[in-house]
Amino acid sequence: MNDVILFGYSKTAQEIASLLTKNKRSFTILTTNETRTDLAIADGYDAHYINYNSDEELIKYGISKGVKTLFCVSEDYNRNLFVTLSARALDPDLFILSLAADEAQEKKMILAGANKNINPYTVGANRIFRLIKKPVVYRVLDEILFHKSDIKITEVIVPETSHLINIPLFNAKIEADYELMVLGIQGVSKRAKFRFHTYKIRRRIKAGDILVVIGEEKNIEKFIKDLYK
C-alpha cells in the first residue's frame, strides 16, 4: 500500500504526480470522476474511482492505515474540504495539503484540518517546475512537501569580498556546490524588485545583493561561510 494519496486529478494534481514520479515516490490517485480516473490510468498511474462521502472508501485505500500524506487537489474545492475533514477525523497525524482558490477557502481548509494549502493562483506549479533542473532540487522540494524540519529559507547578503561578485546568477553553481535552491535575487537599491531565479537570468551578482536560498541548514551555513571568506 502506498503512503501517499492524491485526491483528484486536476492540472495541479498532474504536476504533483509528475514531480512525485520523477522523484521515485509511489502514490495512489483517487477521483470522483470516472473520466478523470481513466485519464490518470492512461497516464500510467495507479488510480481509482471512489465515493468521497464514504469513510470506508478512504480507509480502504489507506487513510488511518499507513498513508502518511494526502494531497486534496480536486478541481472541486468543496470536495477537497469534505475529504480533508473526513481524513482528519480518521487520522489526527496525517499530513494534509489541500487546494484552495482564495483566502476564505484557505481558512476553511485549515479549520477542516489541512496542514498546508496550495493556491494555484499565487503558487504556480509551472514556475516551480521551471526551476527544477537538478536532482538536488527534487530532493529539497520533496522535503518541503513532506514537512521535514531541516529545510530553511534564508536571505543572504553578498559581501564585497565574495567570490561570486560579477558572476552571472545562472552560472554561480550554488545548487551544484552547496545543494541549495536559489529562489531569487534582489539588488541593494530600494527600488530594486525581487527577481525569481530562472536559468534565463543573466544578471551579474553585485555586492549588497540579497540571495534567497532554500535547503538544509548545514548547507546554508557552509555557503555563508564560504561567501564571507
Image: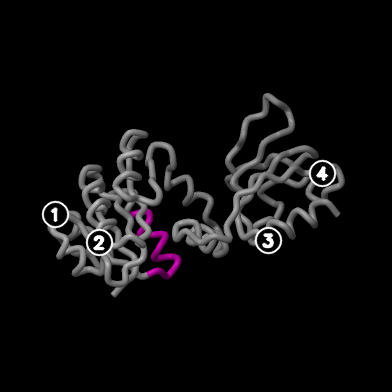
Say whether disc 1 or disc 2 marks the residue closer to the N-terminus.
1
For label 3, the SS is: helix
For label 4, the SS is: loop
Say whether disc 2 or disc 3 marks the residue closer to the N-terminus.
2
Residue 79: image x %, image y %? 21, 47
The residues tagged by marks 4 and 2 sit, at their Cα atoms, a distance apart of 52 Å
Between circles 4 and 2, the one closer to the viewer is 2
Residue 125: image x %, image y %? 42, 47
Q: Nearer the viewer, residue 95 or 163?
A: 95
Between circles 4 and 1, the one closer to the viewer is 1
Q: Check the image and report above or below for 179 versus 77.
A: below
Q: Nearer the viewer, residue 216 or 86?
A: 86
Between circles 2 and 3, the one closer to the viewer is 2
Give the residue at x 34% y 69%: 3
Return the mark for residue 90: 2
Give the residue at x 40% y 69%: 25
The residues tagged by marks 4 and 1 sit, at their Cα atoms, a distance apart of 57 Å
Q: Please name the residue that numbered disc 4 is placed on.
A: 159
